[in-house]
Image (cartoon, rainbow, N blue to C red):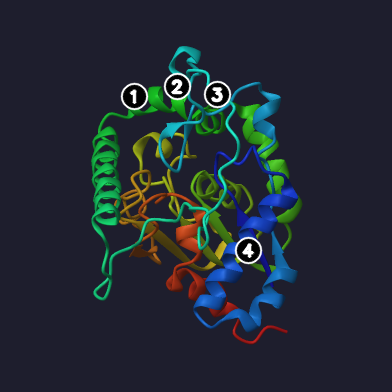
Amino acid sequence: MKVIFIHGMNQQHHSAASIRQRWLHILQKGMRKHQQDARFSYLKRHIRIPFYGDLLSRYNVRNILEAGTLMPQEWPSFPFRKPAQPQLPAPVPRPGWRRPTITDFAQPGSSDTMDFRQKFNYFTALGRNVALRDFALLLNYFPTLHRTLLQRFLIETYLYLDNPDFMREVHERIARQLSGRKPCIVIAHSLGSVIAYNHLIQHPELNVQRFITLGSPLAFQVIQSSLAQPVVRPKAIKGDWINFYSTDDYLTAIPLTEPPFKFEPEIINHGIRTHIHRPHDITGYLLHPQVVEAILELLKNPA
């Protein structure tokens, strides 16, 4: 059975090969972590990842903000803030010296002991995520303002929602890997879940045995207003629709439980925790045991 991954925004720095390599690496790490790595070779053979990240450059635009952090893609250069540094000889390492490395923030657990700096970093990131999440929830009540911010800062999402040519080119890429009547699993992250939903609506002949959405923004009114109306469960989904959302993910912290997503059969919503430093990134989702299990459940006895 084919497993189709549909990526989200801000992937223009990747190629089709590099994004496949990255996602497979994360998935393998998650499977190994949860003692499921024996089935990775099967999954690797059947995974398809349609890539559309390069299309953004054709329109000579780029996202101003990085979706995972809502920080600028690049900071302006101010030479006067960078005084010339004298050319000094490289320091001679002392015995036992090791080059410092930047590590991920620790996620506190019942048995964790963090020093003051780790606690400060953790709660600073947590406070930022809560503030941004609440801001995103508030924006949902002001869709016009929300759309304006998308147009200004997250141009890839705005292009997909409002540019028919861009949307058509994206769906042409998806159709190369997702077509026909053979059973498949579709896994979509971020903007990819909006793209996947539209594609499944447009192609009811597809045979999707499981639709898995990760960090989906479909709950936002500004997204819903751009979907084909009325919003219905795609006929292409022959099995279940499982939606994973993270309470840490300020872009997609709302489950798909309210109209127009009160379908029959209903969407199965799972609230999980992702990485507090980059809560919207695909990594935190693919490493989660419930996500790994949802992907592998239909492949228990792969042929």
Q: Earlier in the sequence, mark 4 or mark 2?
A: 4
Q: Which residue does the numbered mark 3 point to in the structure image? A: 86
Report the residue at 27% width, 63% height from top: 114
Report the residue at 56% width, 60% height from top: 187
- Within the image, what quadrant is residue 11 found in? top right
Tag 1: residue type? Thr
Q: Nearer the viewer, mark 2 or mark 3?
A: 3
Instruction: Tell me the distance, in whole angstroms, between the alpha carbons under discs 2 and 1.
Output: 13 Å
Residue 101 in the image: x percent, y percent? 49, 53
Q: Which residue does the numbered mark 4 point to in the structure image? A: 25
Tag 2: residue type? Arg
Work out whether residue 282 or residue 150 is closer to the camera in this orientation and state it: 282
- Horizontal relation, residue 106 to residue 74: left or right: left
- Horizontal relation, residue 110 to residue 263: left or right: left
Q: Earlier in the sequence, mark 2 or mark 1?
A: 1
Q: Which residue does the numbered mark 2 point to in the structure image? A: 152
